[in-house]
Image (cartoon, rainbow, N blue to C red):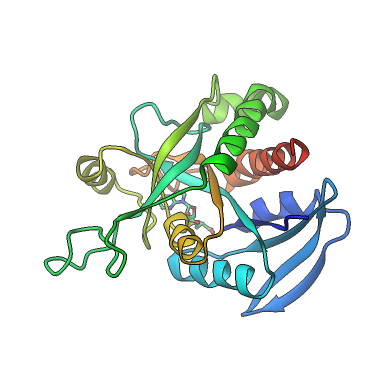
Amino acid sequence: MTTTAIVSALHEELAAVLGLMPDEQPQRVGGREFWRGHLHGQPVVAVLSGIGKVAAATTATALIERFGVQRIVFTGVAGGLGDGVKVGDVVVARSFLQHDMDASPIFPRHEVPGYGRASFEADAALSARLAMASEQVLQTLPAQLGAEVVQAFGLQAPRCHQGLLLSGDRFVSTSAESTALRAELPQALAVEMEGAAFAQVCHDYGVPLAVVRTISDRADDAAHVDFPRFLREVASRYSGAIIETLLASR
Ligand code: SAH
């Protein structure tokens, strides 16, 4: 049976996934706990990647080399960049790009040296299933969070978007920076700190990857406001429900 890795960058999101596993056992590798167990009867390895591209790349490598996972699903939060990508929406990546990769003038801006390309693809079939699971969750979950939470974060009529996800080793939290990113990479839907690193490692090993991100902020001057509360009360609930729906739908 296919072993699925479920990865989160932040504690609250992993906690929601571990809560769905009846039998998880920790194994410590490279300073991280990898939790082996099952979810809906399917073998799963759940792990906290930590924040940033290096933490993401070492986690992905360990999952593949040490734990033999055959596909990786990442769930996390991100800052919205695209028009109409608002807090409480969900983005499922179709492709990934490292917005802070710059070996110019030797290589074109954003191109990853040695690969002849700037962007890496998500697995189309797995991502389509993840998008379906996300759509399903968006139809029911916000109502379950309660009117006060919906009001506080403006979660009315959330949408699922699919497209380009940016990653870099920066928490993008100024309007100047997000405006510059939007001008430079107009197709980008959202920005985070791990996805493109996972995509590069998964490309190296030929392992299917899908990434879902709940939009926690607009990557602007208000990006830090209420981040912990959003994680606790909204994002972790989305993560748990989307992963549960995905693995139940096999
Ligand atoms: N304050 C947080 C730090 C979160 S860092 C804490 O206490 O732990 C941001 C994490 O969320 C990263 O894993 C990144 O992938 C994602 N993220 C959310 N919004 C982002 C933004 N505007 N820019 C970059 N990453 C963002």
Residue appearing at x 60%, y 56% in the figure = 8
Q: Taking 48 as reference, is 45 left or right?
A: right
Quarter of the image for the C terminus: give it.
Answer: top right
Residue appearing at x 34%, y 34% in the figure = 82
Residue appearing at x 78%, y 71% in the figure = 26
Residue appearing at x 69%, y 70% in the figure = 67
Q: Nearer the viewer, residue 82 or 248?
A: 248
The image shows residue 177 at horizontal and vertical percentages of 26, 49
The image shows residue 168 at horizontal and vertical percentages of 36, 59
Q: Taking 96 as reference, is 131 left or right?
A: right
Quarter of the image for the N terminus: give it.
Answer: bottom right
Which residue sits furthest bottom? 30
Q: Nearer the viewer, residue 205 or 137?
A: 205
Quadrant of res 9? bottom right
Q: Taking 162 as reference, is 44 left or right?
A: right
The answer to whether residue 180 is above or below residue 54 is above
Quadrant of res 110? bottom left
Quadrant of res 207? bottom right
Which residue sits furthest left? 105
The image shows residue 150 at horizontal and vertical percentages of 60, 26
The image shows residue 163 at horizontal and vertical percentages of 41, 37
